[in-house]
Image (spheres, rainbow, N blue to C red):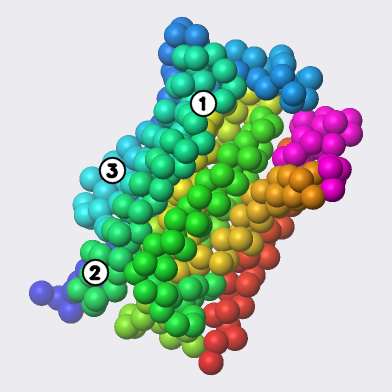
Amino acid sequence: MNPTLMDHAATVQLASTSSSPMRQILFAAVFALVLSLVGTPVLIRILARHGYGQMIRDDGPKTHHSKRGTPTMGGIAFILATLVAYAMTKLLVGTAPTASGLLVLFLMTGMGLVGFLDDYIKIVKQRSLGLRAKAKMAGQLIVGVLFAIGALNFADSAGVHPASTKLSFVTDFGWSLGPVLFALWAIFMILAMSNGVNLTDGLDGLATGASVMVFGAYVFIGIWEYGQTCGSAASAGPLCYQVRDPLDLAVVGAALMGACFGFLWWNTSPAKIFMGDTGSLALGGALAGLAICSHTEMLLAILGGLFVLITLSVIIQVGSFRMTGKRVFKMAPLQHHFELKGWSEVLIVVRFWIIQGLCVAVGLGLFYAGWVTAT
């Protein structure tokens, strides 16, 4: 064969191989976006036909009473869109699912199922509170424990597991926690983040838009870790990442980002559908799963800074009232405080999105700085 043709064929094959990772990410994002964008209005009609509308707390802001009856459990739309988009991407590209990707999807779906039961009970019993606190916690614990056990198994050919027993910021550091302490730490992260997103989901589009930004950050992190994987010829920098399946974590992040984008079209003010606990617990679980499997556990507190801030507002409010009998905010979570101060819902959402965008920018800056300054 002509050497020139051989060189050309090799170049084409190399280009095809190098573009495959980006194709997977692009396919996952586009498929999930389209499925969510088209599937959400179908879900709206189904929920409305059965009368599955949102219950509104009587002690909440009065402006929310007009939202009573808006279809809820919208998380079903982007959960299914994410799962189908991931499967379609794998079939189209011809690559097998990975342990890390499947574990994150399991965590998302399992937490979503707990939220679905909570939402369904609210609707059937026509009350603003669904599952009892102990039952809801038990469901989250079961899903979290199963994820933690799975994350410490399924090693690849190099012996790398989806999760590490060490703590991590931009990469692993410190001593090993051991399997038991790691499981407790993972469960804490899952509960904290899922309930943080749940508390943030109080205004139209707020939690959805904020989640899009954090999932976008994890797409970048997954791509970067894939390019700097330990033992890879591409890793020429001062730091490499001992992470299993970083590319597939980016694919899952892209699917979640696209699915949330499509849902946001219908969830933004005035919302045609709410994600409910089905969606908020699923998103929080997915974020925690991505952080654990990408070894950026503590970095998630910065990347998801808005969720942390809103959770802290509730802790401060409850703690202050129990200790002093006084409230720090007019109402918690924090977004409702500004509502009672007279801010419009759209104004609060946009400004909180700006805060979340800054948190993502700072988080990614720290992630990159950790790579640059490594010795």
**Residue behind mark 2:** 155
Dot 1 lies on which element?
loop
Label 2 crowd bin: few (<14), some (14–19), many (20+), radius 10 Å: some
Q: Are marks 1 and 3 in contact (CB under 8 Å)?
A: no
Q: Which amino acid does label 1 sit on?
A: Gly
Horizontal side, residue 324 vs residue 180: left or right = right
Q: Please state which amino acid type lies under the numbered disc 2.
A: Ala
Rounded to the nearest whole Å, what is the CA distance between mark 1 and mark 3? 32 Å
Relative placement, left or right, of 143 versus 198 is left
Badge nearest the viewer, 1 or 3 = 1
Residue wearing tag 3: 87
The answer to whether the residues at label 2 and label 3 have Cβ atoms under 8 Å apart is no
Farthest residue in the right direction? 341
Who's the residue at 45% across and 69% down the image?
295
Residue drawn 60% across and 13% down? 69
Give the magenta range. Answer: 324-348
Q: Residue 367's quadrant in the figure?
A: bottom right
Give the image location of residue 238, x and y in percent: 49, 88
Q: Which amino acid does label 3 sit on?
A: Ala
Look at discs 2 and 1 and give the one toward the viewer. Answer: 1
Within-10-Å neighbours for mark 3: few <14, some 14–19, many 20+: some
What is the C-alpha distance between the residues marked 2 and 1?
39 Å
- Where residue 365 appears, x then y in whole percent? 64, 70
Q: Residue at x 72, y 19 (%)?
A: 58
Residue 49 part of the magenta segment: no
The residue that disc 1 covers is 130
